[in-house]
Image: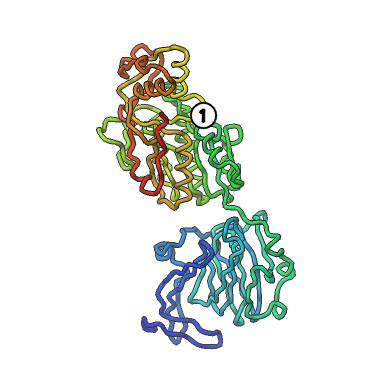
Amino acid sequence: MASKRSTRRRGSDGVTEYGKQLKVTDTPIPGLVVFDLPVHGDARGWFKENWQREKMTALGLPDFGPVQNNISFNDAVGTTRGIHAEPWDKWVSVATGRIFGAWVDLREGPTFGAVYTTELDPSKAIFVPRGVGNSYQTLEPNTAYTYLVNDHWSPTAEYSFLNLADETAAIDWPIPLDQVEISEKDKNHPRLADVVPIPPKKILIIGANGQLGSALRTSYAGVRHVEFADRSSLSLLSPDLLSSRNWGDYGTIINAAAYTKVDAAETSDGRRVAWATNVSGVARLAQIATMNKITLVHVSSDYVFDGSLERPYREDDPVCPLGVYGQTKAAGDAIVSTVPQHFIVRTSWVVGDGHNFVRTMTSLASRGVDPTVVDDQFGRLTPAADIARSIRHLLESGAPFGIYNVTGGGDVLSWAEIARRVFMSAGHDPARVAGVTTAAYYASTDGAVSPRPRNSVLDTTKIVSTGFTLGDALI
């Protein structure tokens, strides 16, 4: 074998450099990266690791999960193919021979139309993200062009194309296009001005009519690649959920659907629905996300804790739910944590559009009703809009996957203290609000009652460290 020092093999098939270190080089097209590959050779020939998941992902390559390997063999010098933007990621390299490759960004965004060119021989490879147009021209006879893709070919897949001779891209082909072999189809692809930019993979928001769903609708208003689904259009319990969509078209699922009737969950009927929605339905989403390499965003609750700690709860504190609702949320969290690409957004005391505590207190104040409110449970109100904002932040900032606590900012208060502030902000006497213990409040309640955590304060240090700014207190 050759020594570790870089050497070159010269022959009729050109030059292949031996002994390089595995190295990654960025390009002007986001996500398009070139790898130098170690090739080991001697008089018998050469050997290389063309794809090595552990080493390459350690250098920052996305763990793109290839499922198919294709090889295009080209007899003659000057064979030219492209420019094709497929709906999957590609790992492109050369087994024998040498190519001139050209890549054009055909995705929506500020780099639409950006061009990158380079030569590839067996000692180089390139990762081509979905939506980046790919093309090449052979520079040696008997060139074998090989590529891994992370989706199976489908006749219904949507492609985008660019003409090889497009004047805007202005690719400097080593061999003029009028002197090379090109298919009629490739000759007739559109110019850049006529190419419709490829949108990102779709985002599906489930539970789009709830408090958080409404906030997400507002946050993503006008974003073309976002879909909203309510119970009428998508049920997590539907027997055909796995086949209800072409899940390969989706990059993110945001699950804002949940059974949240805390007290009703303690009844036999409520328990059944809570487990079906918060656990069985979530398990099916996790299966879909894992199978299709989708990022799953799941919203959790302070009810996974028993509230006995004397400090704010961190993301890594062991769960210890008191009631059925909390048990189902903890089980859902455990399932989602097995998805390779996941965010669990854990929150508390959510207020948004529709019925909520602040609106109830405001109504009571205006109607002259003096309420009795629990004063031994503590936490922070969390606007649904802040949760929606945190989800977009996590998805768009490159934050590491995992669990993040998200609440509103401001003081830690009891429900009674919040009620008094609502009264005051509405111009009423806060002394009209009387405090009462949780035990006394529910002592005369008919029907099932779920135990509540006394301490619902969540430590938000982790999400703040990603650059997220907590919202101001509502009152």
Q: Amino acid at mark 1?
A: Asp
Left or right? Give the position of 472 relative to 152: left
- Residue 233: image location, x then y, percent: 61, 35
Residue 367 vertical placement versus 297 (above, below): above
> Mark 1 sits on what residue?
353
Where does the C terminus fall, quadrant-wise?
top left
Q: Residue at x 59, y 47 (%)?
A: 225
Q: Residue at x 45, y 62 (%)?
A: 61
Q: Quadrant of residue 92?
A: bottom right
Secondary structure at badge 1 equals: loop
Residue 400 vertical placement versus 212 (above, below): below
Where does the N terminus fall, quadrant-wise?
bottom left
Q: Colour scheme used in the picture?
A: rainbow
- Residue 411: image location, x then y, percent: 33, 32
Circle 1: is it few (<14), some (14-19), or many (20+) Cα within 10 Å? some
Q: Residue at x 48, y 45 (%)?
A: 392
